[in-house]
Image: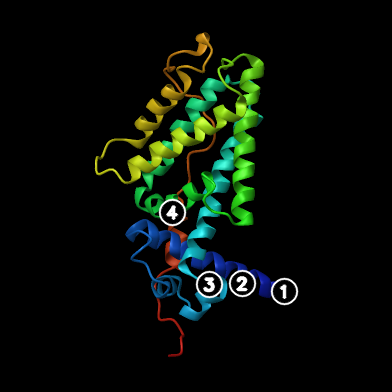
Amino acid sequence: MISGPRAQSKSRQRERILDAARSLFAERGVEPVTMADVALSAGVARATVFNYFASKYALVEAITDDVVAYFQGMLENALADRVTPTPAIVRALFSHMGAGIEAYRGFYRGVFREIARISVGLDEGLAARRTREVTSAQLVRLMERGLARGDLRPVAPAVDLARAFESLSNGTIIGWLYDEQSDSLRQRMERAAEIFLAPVAASRFAGRPRRLVALAAPPQDPTGDTPGKRARRAPRRAKETK
């Protein structure tokens, strides 16, 4: 088992490669980017990229894990909030996801297919299945709490409400990512939240409030593109044997 400075160096190098891939995917989309492009941007040899990631798909998978983890963090914050009514949290989740994805459309257009595969259970890998189970369980807990408090009408079991939430949010996002219209995803998501809540929210929570609850910190740049990282990631000649 590698430990100490060598392990830290390998971890930094892996993150450097991921940073480069995120930036390139955001700028060009996933399909046109090659492993050689990632290597050049990261300032490493092409073979080094393959040491960490067996394929471009493996790179996308690793980046997808980070995005899904961020969404799971939002749900954890929502569950930790025991004061805000459930409909307000649902509205905030839809709006928050819309704002974050809208800001980085190119990046998410490339990786959201993979996120959706996990969300709807098309990826049969063990890790993907575990990710889906965690996210689904979080949504079910949120809906169960809403039903128990009377925030939500008992029109369906919590598990069905959670599935409806996922289907409506994922469908709205995918539709926007591949739609040539330039309207706001955040606005689409806020309308989708009202569609979800119309038959579900208790009457005292009907109608969208003037101000949404602050659920979490604003979404961070998924490309990890800070001035410091851009400077460290400046393309340079890689030491690669032919």
Q: Is residue 108 above or below residue 47?
A: above
**Which residue position is annotated with label 4?**
111
Query: Which one is in front in this view, the residue at disc 2 or the one at disc 4?
Result: 4
Q: CA distance from mark 4 to mark 1?
A: 31 Å
Task: Give the image location of residue 182, x and y in percent.
Answer: 25, 40
Circle 2 — which element? helix
Report the residue that reaches farthest toward the left: 181
Specify the amino acid type for callout 2. Lys
Q: Position of residue 166 (x, y in %)?
A: 50, 36
| Residue named by callout 1 | 2
Dot 3 or dot 4: first in sequence order is 3
C-alpha separation, residue under disc 2 versus residue under disc 4: 25 Å
| 4 and 1 marks in contact (CB < 8 Å) | no
Q: Secondary structure at mark 3?
A: loop
The first of marks 1 and 2 along the sequence is 1
Quarter of the image holding residue 6? bottom right
Q: Nearer the viewer, residue 124 or 99?
A: 124
Give the CA separation, mark 3 to mark 1.
20 Å
User: Mark 1 near mark 2, Cβ–Cβ under 8 Å?
Assistant: yes
Give the crowd class for mark 3: few <14, some 14-19, many >=20 residues within 10 Å: few
